[in-house]
Amino acid sequence: MDKYMQAALDEAHQGLAEGGIPIGSVLVYRGRILGRGHNRRVQSGSTVLHGEMDALENAGRQPASVYRDCVLYTTLSPCPMCSGAILLYGIPRVVVGENRSFMGEEALLRSRGVDVEVLQSPACIDMMSDFIEASPELWNEDIGE
Amino acid sequence: MDKYMQAALDEAHQGLAEGGIPIGSVLVYRGRILGRGHNRRVQSGSTVLHGEMDALENAGRQPASVYRDCVLYTTLSPCPMCSGAILLYGIPRVVVGENRSFMGEEALLRSRGVDVEVLQSPACIDMMSDFIEASPELWNEDIGE
C-alpha cells in the first residue's frame, strides 16, 4: 500500500483503538505529511472533526499556495462537510481508500475540477464494513442519519 | 433584528473583540439556541472552526432528528465547508445575515432542498466590509485565497 494511505489507515486504526470511528486521513504537501488525523466524534464529542477535518486542523494555518499543491488521503469517501473543506481550500487531488461502505461527494468534487482517485483497498473496506456492522448507530450519527 | 441573528451578530462581535474574524452563528432547535460560535482562526489557530462550524461543534452530538428540525443562523453566506456541514446534518433551513461581502454555496444548498433566506442586514454588511478592508490577508486566508 502507498505509504500515505498507510499513514491514513494507521490513523484510522488508532481511532478504533481509542473506541472511535475508524476513519483516518493525512494531508500531504510535496511528499511531506503536513497534518494527520482521525475521526474524533467519540473521543472528543466532536461533530466537526471527521478524519479529513482533523488532518486539516492538525496541519495548522497554511497559505492558499500550500493547499493548492497538496494531496489529501482519506480511508473513506469524503462526506459533504469534508468535501466542502477540500473545495474551500482548493486541494486539487484526493486519494480515497474506498467508497463501498459510503459514497461521499465524489461527483461534486470532480465537477469542481478535483482529481479523485479511489483505491478500493480491501484493508479499508474490511475495516469500515466491520465497524458499521458492529456499531450501526454510531456510524449513522456520524453521517447525519 | 431577529433575536437569533442578533445572537449570531453578538458572536461575531465577540470574535472581533478577541482579534479574530467577525463571523458568528447560532444553531436553533425549536426556538432554543443549541449551540453558538464564532470563527476561531486567529484565536485557536483553527482552519476548520468557521463560525457555523463552531456553533455546530458547541451544540454537541445530536441525533439526526434534532438537526432535521433546526435552523442555522450565520452572519455571512456559508462557505463550501460550512455548506457541506449543513448538508451532512440535513439542516433544512439557513438564515444568512448577508452575502454581499462573500457569496457562499447558497445555490448548492438550494439545489439540495435547503431553504436559504438572506437578510442583507446593514449591520452584518458593515461589520464584514470594514473587516475585509482592514485585514484583507487574513480574510483571504479564511476563504482559501
Image (cartoon, coloured by chain):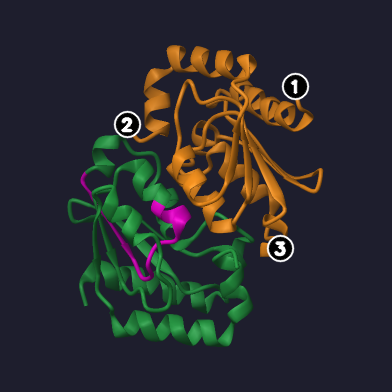
Chain colours: A orange, B green
Residue B53 appears in view: no
How many angstroms separate mark 3 from mark 2 (CA)?
Answer: 36 Å
Task: Pick the residue in front: B63 or B93.
Answer: B93
How many angstroms separate mark 1 from mark 2 (CA)?
Answer: 32 Å
Secondary element at image label 3: helix
Q: Is there CB contact under 8 Å for labels 3 and 2? A: no
Name the residue type under label 2: Glu
Q: Is residue B11 magenta?
A: no
Of all residues, the one furthest to the right in this rendering is A31
Name the residue type under label 3: Ser
Residue B90, given in percent of the width and then of the height, sits at: 30, 43
Residue A90 appears in view: yes
Above or below, A25 against A22 in this view is below
Above or below, B30 against A6 in this view is below
Secondary element at image label 2: loop
- Image quarter of residue B125: bottom left
- Tell whether A70 sits left or right of A102: right
Residue on which the image places disc 1: A1
The residue drawn where x is 81% and y is 43% is: A31
Name the residue type under label 1: Met
Residue on which the image places disc 3: A65
The reply to whether label 3 and label 1 mark residues of one chain is yes
Q: Nearer the viewer, mark 3 or mark 2?
A: 3
Disc on res. B8: none
Q: Is residue B77 magenta?
A: yes
Secondary element at image label 1: loop
In the image, which residues are magenta? B69-83
Chain for numbered disc 3: A
- Tell whether A84 sits left or right of A22: left
